[in-house]
Image (cartoon, rainbow, N blue to C red):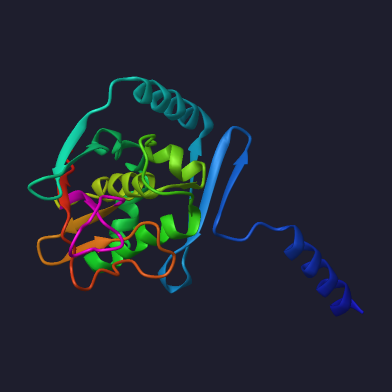
Amino acid sequence: QDYGNLSDEFNDFRVRAIAPPYIYVHERSVELAFLGSGDSFIQWHVPFETLEATIIQGNNSRNLAPAWVDLSLNEYQTVRMMDFRPFVDPQPFANVIPKLYAATEQDRDFVWEVWQIIAQLTAYSSEINETPRYPLETLLAAGGDCEDTSILFASMIKAAPVDWDVSLVYMDSNNPTNPQEINHVIVRVNTGTEIFLVETTSKSVMDPFTDGVRGWFFPVEG
């Protein structure tokens, strides 16, 4: 009888409980949790005031005249795209990312863990456009398009206590090695010993571009 009662209590708790990955707003604090490698459970919180300030900053920045880059598809065609690098901001992750880096044994493990956070906590919404978001906007809204998740991933990588080369890569997702148009953004991470071409909108494969990418690479400073 005791076992039956305990089982009922457990089943009721399981129905009501929040299981990771999740984003949960509670008492003016945004709680985030996700599963790391080896079934580890990683959690941190962001004050709601930080989210509000980021939304205001994002709205103000999007109302300003954007920066542009001109990309030559061929000798006859040049495409003008918004420069998304000004939206990369490592500062909101200055407390959690160094701890995550210290807990990983290899650079690849750390890059994978950061990609997993985005894969678990965000949803892909639409294709490249000209309304980029700051990283916390994308993370705490639980979604965005390719430039939003790329900005988020680059921001989190740049918050690590390492000096890696990180670039936003404009490319043709349908023709990665022979671009016919520009319709996608990914992130290139060069650790000095290994290079990753990270697809931030994927839920299953971090670096699917086994044949490389012929695109336009713009280094992220800071």
- Name the side, left or right, on which 212 lies relative to 5: left
Nearer-the-camera pick, 106 or 130: 130
Nearer-the-camera pick, 191 or 45: 191
- Name the side, left or right, on which 19 lies relative to 6: left
Which corner quadrant of the image does residue 61 belong to? Answer: top left
In the rendered view, tell whether residue 64 sits above or below residue 140.
Answer: above
Where does residue 18 sit, x and y in percent of width and height? Answer: 65, 57
Quadrant including the C terminus: top left
Is 179 covered by the magenta stretch? yes
Work out which residue is located at the far left of the displayed protein and give it. Answer: 75
- Magenta residues: mostly which secondary structure? loop
Nearer-the-camera pick, 208 or 73: 73
Where does residue 72 sit, x and y in percent of width and height? Answer: 12, 45
Is 157 covered by the magenta stretch? no
In the rendered view, tell whether residue 77 sits above or below residue 9.
Answer: above
Where does residue 103 sit, x and y in percent of width and height? Answer: 32, 62
- Name the side, left or right, on which 141 lies relative to 19: left
In the rendered view, tell whether residue 12 sits above or below residue 38.
Answer: above
Where does residue 15 sit, x and y in percent of width and height? Answer: 76, 62
Work out which residue is located at the far front of the displayed protein and give it. Answer: 76
Q: How many marks?
A: 0
Which corner quadrant of the image does residue 21 belong to? Answer: bottom right
Work out which residue is located at the far right of the displayed protein and give it. Answer: 1
In the rendered view, tell whether residue 14 sits above or below residue 98.
Answer: below
Residue drawn at (79%, 69%), measured in percent from left and top?
Answer: 11
Q: Which residues are magenta?
A: 165-184
Residue drawn at (92%, 79%), measured in percent from left and top?
Answer: 1
